[in-house]
Amino acid sequence: PKSAGDHCLLLPLSSAFGLKLLPPLVMATGVATRSFLRRHVRIAERNIRNMGPLSLSSIGFGGYRIDPKSEVHFNALLKAIKSGINVIDTAPSYSDGGSERMIGAAIRHLELSGDAKREELLISTKVGYIEGSDLEAVKNNPPLESFKISDDAWHCIHPDYIIRQIDESSERLGSVPDFVLLHSPEFFLSYGLPAGKYDTEEKIDKAYGLFYERIGKAFECLEKLIKEGRIGHYYGVSSSLRGCDFSVTGRENRFEAVSLKALLDTAKAAA
């Protein structure tokens, strides 16, 4: 943007910057992420984290409420990356897809200026929430195993919907995400099952059995997408762990949370 009134991010990304979308298989690499951090001498070795072959800044940029119409937000992301931050977190539900679109635009801007390359950055997104224009698109034909959280939000981690969300995120980002997280899947325990039927430990255990069965199917799908190159590197869960004081609903956390051990065991089985 050249002026306060010139919101080029409102335009299609290819028009906004006169660039073609990045090839969809461009993703973070070990060599590139390490090279990026070495260029930023202000990043001390103790502030670098290694994840497999990737070298990552210990601080990331969160894209929760960034607005694609805001030059302030756009420039904040550019400054973060130019300062040595190479971890960027987003989700399809953030600003109704606008967060992902702005991140994609910023990366292409940095490519053009020579300040960063897509391979130097780890992009993490999520799947699960159905909100905004996405909700309007599926209301008349709900995805399999979806359920209502509120009038404005549904939730789904069925493999068919996971694939749809990841492909749409890749289109907005201009490249495949490096990391995909299941977004608050414990909503299934809060809203996806009949209320008021958890009056015994046996029934709570049964509910958790159904929950991890769904997680397992989702993990198998994510494993497959990594092998196909539709996810760059990893998958995981963005969630409230069991032991937290409160659940995703804000109520006292009796059973609306996940076990880290159970997630790891489920991931091993999926692999």
Image (cartoon, helix red, strand yellow):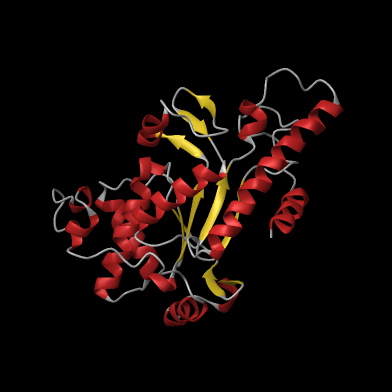
Front position in the image: 85 or 204: 204
Residue at image point 72% right, 42% down: 212
Would you say 163 lies left or right of 202 here? left
Quarter-of-image position of residue 108: bottom left
Residue at image point 67% right, 20% down: 194
Outermost residue on the top side: it is: 196
Q: Quadrant of the N terminus?
A: bottom left
Q: Position of residue 2 (x, y in %)?
A: 14, 58
Q: Position of residue 25 (x, y in %)?
A: 41, 67
Front position in the image: 228 or 132: 228
Front position in the image: 160 or 2: 160
Q: Quadrant of the C terminus?
A: bottom right
Would you say 104 lies left or right of 194 here? left
Would you say 95 lies left or right of 202 here? left
Would you say 89 lies left or right of 235 here? left
Q: Position of residue 227 (x, y in %)?
A: 56, 65
Q: From what the image shows, is residue 189 above or below residue 177?
A: above
Q: Position of residue 154 (x, y in %)?
A: 50, 30
Residue at image point 72% right, 50% down: 263
Residue at image point 67% right, 34% down: 246
Front position in the image: 21 or 253: 21
